[in-house]
Image (cartoon, rainbow, N blue to C red):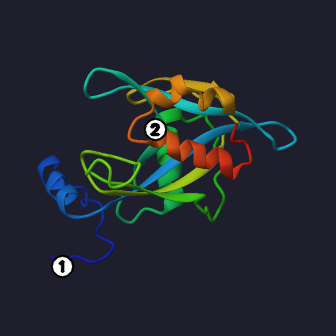
Amino acid sequence: MSRTALDYGDAWFEPDEFDEVRRRLPIAYVNAVPVRVGPDGQLEKVGLLLRSMDDGSLGRELVSGRIRYHETVRSALLRHVENDLGPMALPQVPVSPQPFTVAEYFPTRGATALHDPRQHAIALCYILPVGGECTPRQDALSLDWLSPAEAMSDGIREEMRHGQDRVLAQALAHLGELP
């Protein structure tokens, strides 16, 4: 049987295969900063996930995840928001989403401000207004809605993993809301 570009149903790697790919290639991700906006369109709150980390500690993260083979960026954003925030989050994803920045995570600490010990990853970063009811799912313990000042407080920034506090700061600056 011949394979074509549309044979993507079995394109996901086994864990050992994926570890090898991670060692050789940058992996494409999306990062999303969920926000609540008021009727006037002004930023009111920023949503941050609280997760249990591999080392047993707790940490805060943005909504994020890999882009699958043959998946649009928009579809990846919707899938990860639903996976992390639940099916009733009702994110407002534009038809043609444009990232506010591109984050580059390196496995080597110090190469950039963003560090992911597993891999070299490129993340397209988005700000997504969320209008519905959020119920954290997957491995998220909670979703906390914080004011921009609260989100950028030293205590919250210290809880953020992999340098994502810098992505959050860029998102707030992009919105003109950096405290």
Q: Quadrant of the C terminus?
A: top right
Q: Nearer the viewer, residue 81 or 9?
A: 81
User: Relative to 175, is 17 on the left or the right?
Assistant: left
Q: Quadrant of residue 148?
A: top right
Question: Is residue 5 visible from the viewing direction of this image?
Answer: yes
Task: List x then y, in percent, for residue 59.
Answer: 41, 26
The disc at residue 83 is 2
Q: Is residue 179 left or right of residue 26?
A: right
The circle drawn on residue 87 is none
Which residue matches tag 1?
Answer: 2
- Judging depth in this view, the residue of 66 and 26 nearest the camera is 26
Tell me how far mark 1 sits from mark 2, CA to CA: 34 Å
**Amino acid found under the numbered disc labelled 2:** Asn
Point 28% across, 20% down: residue: 56
Q: Is residue 24 above or below residue 172?
A: below
On the image, the x and y values in percent for residue 168 come to: 56, 42
